[in-house]
Image: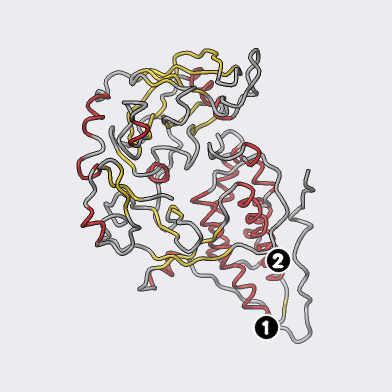
Amino acid sequence: MQAHVDPATSTEPNVPELEGSAALSLTVANPATKMAADPAQTLRVLNMGRTMNEKFDQMRKQARSILTATRNSRNRIAPERVEEMENRFADADVFLDWLTTEVQMTPNIKTSAGVELALNNLVDPKNNVPEELAGQAKLLLDKYKAENWGEDIVPDEDPDEDPAQGSNAQPQPLPAVGPIVNVVQLPAANDPTFGVGGIMYGVVVNTTGKRKEYRIRADILRKSPKEYGHNGIALGSWYPFQINTLFWGAHGARMGGIAGSVSTGAWSIVVAATYEDLDTDHGDIIYYSGSNSHDNTDPKKTAPASQGTKALTASHRTQNPIRVLRSGGASNRSRNRHLPSCGLRYDGLYRVVSSRHRLNKKGGLYEQFKLERLPGQTPLSELQRSSPTTAQYVFPIALLGKSLFSPYPIILRKCVILSEA
């Protein structure tokens, strides 16, 4: 096991106070303010890696940088170091944007990544942190405390990632190279794809790394998915990618299939063909498995319940309704006729009515939940006929080609969508 490095004690070398040094006075611009003043409409983002371990590494490095900046902002330091400290605070500003839009907080991230310590240092008035940055940190700190640092929330986990790399993974040693601050172009308000009313509104594309990456825009207020019921989402609403469902408040996870609370139940789930050996979709009735159900090999005992499984168990107990989205694609639809031809479709509210035990392909016991669609909603067959719409199903290539901001489209069985790869 790798030794854990405590961010509080593993800090960067002290900057000595020098004779004849100047008092440190720092400012950092708010991203939205910078965008309004910048005709090129750009946004600074951090490249935080793709795997959970990479993100842990970079979060810890950012926390260390914040500790260095706040420690030295109290002191009188050499004038030549003022710019360095300003840059650290500017990066901290972008880091908080990333935490706000991209991270589902967990107790492990709170402590192991040093997030709580970094935020406490930013809000400490003795540290002379720029006012806007301190205010942003306080809002985030208050939010995390109100949510008990995600203790009750299902963590957002990538189903394709090694479980050892998940939210409870031990952080690895810091890499030699720190996170890179990228500058990405923002779309024009009338961009047909990413502008107001476009199917990718609220999302920005970072193409500065090795792979194109979609990020939720920190300058646009998004809707919280942490509500039961429709949450203002119209039946049949369609989204190109799961990140869009997160922006609009339809689903509470960017990658995971279950989003919700382990005490009051799931807010939403995504039904896909990924686990067709575990789940069965009959339309108005769904048999849905908990997280990590495919890993167990014990035929007599289920694996320890994941947070996702606990949330579904809570849904059965509380009877809180669950928003169900179906995620499709041409190849997936051939295996499940209820899935959309592409993207994700909101199919309404379901309720967990029972649970049972089944065996997975490895012969391991797992828990499966039966969900029934609530009555009084638009029939599922009608939603399947009407969503995605013709405009979404055959997205105008000519219009898309006029968008300089938009990436190249791909065509999938007459369904033109934006490539997420």
Q: Quadrant of residue 367?
A: top right
Q: Quadrant of residue 106?
A: top right
- Relative to 72, 331 lies left or right: left
Q: Earlier in the sequence, mark 1 or mark 2?
A: 2
Amino acid under disc 2? Thr
Q: Quadrant of the N terminus?
A: top right
Q: Quadrant of residue 237?
A: top left
Which element is circle 1 on? helix
Which element is circle 2 on? helix
What residue lies at 28% left-to-right and 32% top-to-bottom?
235
Residue 170, x across and y down, in percent:
71, 44
Q: Which residue is mark 1?
A: 79
Q: Residues within 10 Å of mark 1 (few under 14, many from 20)?
A: some
Q: Is residue 281 positioned above or below 111 on the image?
A: above
Amino acid under disc 1? Pro
What residue lies at 63% left-to-right and 56% top-to-bottom?
58
- Relative to 418, 359 lies left or right: right
* Front position in the image: 370 or 54: 54
Residue 21, x across and y down, in percent:
73, 84
Q: Which mark is residue 68?
A: 2
* Front position in the image: 101 or 407: 407
What residue lies at 64% left-to-right and 21% top-to-bottom?
297
Q: Which mark is residue 135?
A: none
Residue 86, x across and y down, in percent:
60, 73
